[in-house]
Amino acid sequence: MIPYTEPSWKNYIVKTLKPVFTPEECNKIIEIGRSQPKEDSKIFNKKQKITQEYDLRKSNVSWINFSNPDANFLFNKIETMLHQINQNNFGFENITLTEAAQYTEYGPGDHYDWHMDCSVNMLTQPKVRKISMSLLLSPSNEYEGGDLSFIRESKKLKLEQGYATFFASFIIHKVSPVTRGLRKSLVMWFGGTPFK
């Protein structure tokens, strides 16, 4: 049997060491997100159909597209950071920005139960999601609850305004119910060809 050692650099959950965006830039992203049509959040159910299931996910979302010139600063900065983080931590191949950014608001009682951001049935994903990003846009004192947890309830990741976490899209995670205020976040996904 050939011994195998994991590379020392690999990490599948990475929190930025400094803010990605200033409070002013966060407010600009909030303004852009709120200027787009708002909709109730949806999920893919077990039959791979898009549906609303409020016991699993409840929040309001809107979409910020690449074609929005006001959002150029957002996409340029995140894409540069993505490639650095992928090279230093994940080492995934064929990673590109493939989807519009999701602006999300969680009010009291809103949540997103345990889920993965990629499907085991990759036929439903023309570009396979490999890396996900969640960035907190609102100051953390504007809300309570809304904890982002990975793998198990006790593994919570506390973010401050402007900070982000990048993580492998196949890691199970959740946002616990907000108990006060409004939690505003930016979520993005990056992918490419299937894993090899």
Image (tube, rainbow, N blue to C red):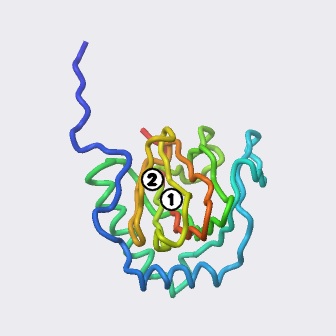
Whether residue 192 appears in this view of the structure is: yes
Is the residue 113 above or below the residue 120 in the image? below
Residue 110: quarter of image: bottom right
Residue position marked by numbered label 1 in the rendering: 189
Q: Is residue 67 left or right of residue 85?
A: right
Residue position marked by numbered label 2 in the rendering: 131
- The image position of residue 146, as x and y in percent, is 56, 58
- The image position of residue 73, as x and y in percent, is 42, 82
SS type, badge 2: strand
Of residues 92 and 114, the one drawn nearer to the viewer in this rendering = 114
Q: Residues within 10 Å of mark 1 (few under 14, many from 20)?
A: many
Is the residue 18 above or below the residue 194 in the image? below
Whether residue 101 appears in this view of the structure is: no
Residue shown at the point (29%, 49%) measured from the top left: 89
Q: Is residue 61 left or right of residue 69?
A: right
Residue furthest out toward the top: 1
Residue shown at the point (64%, 84%) measured from the top left: 35
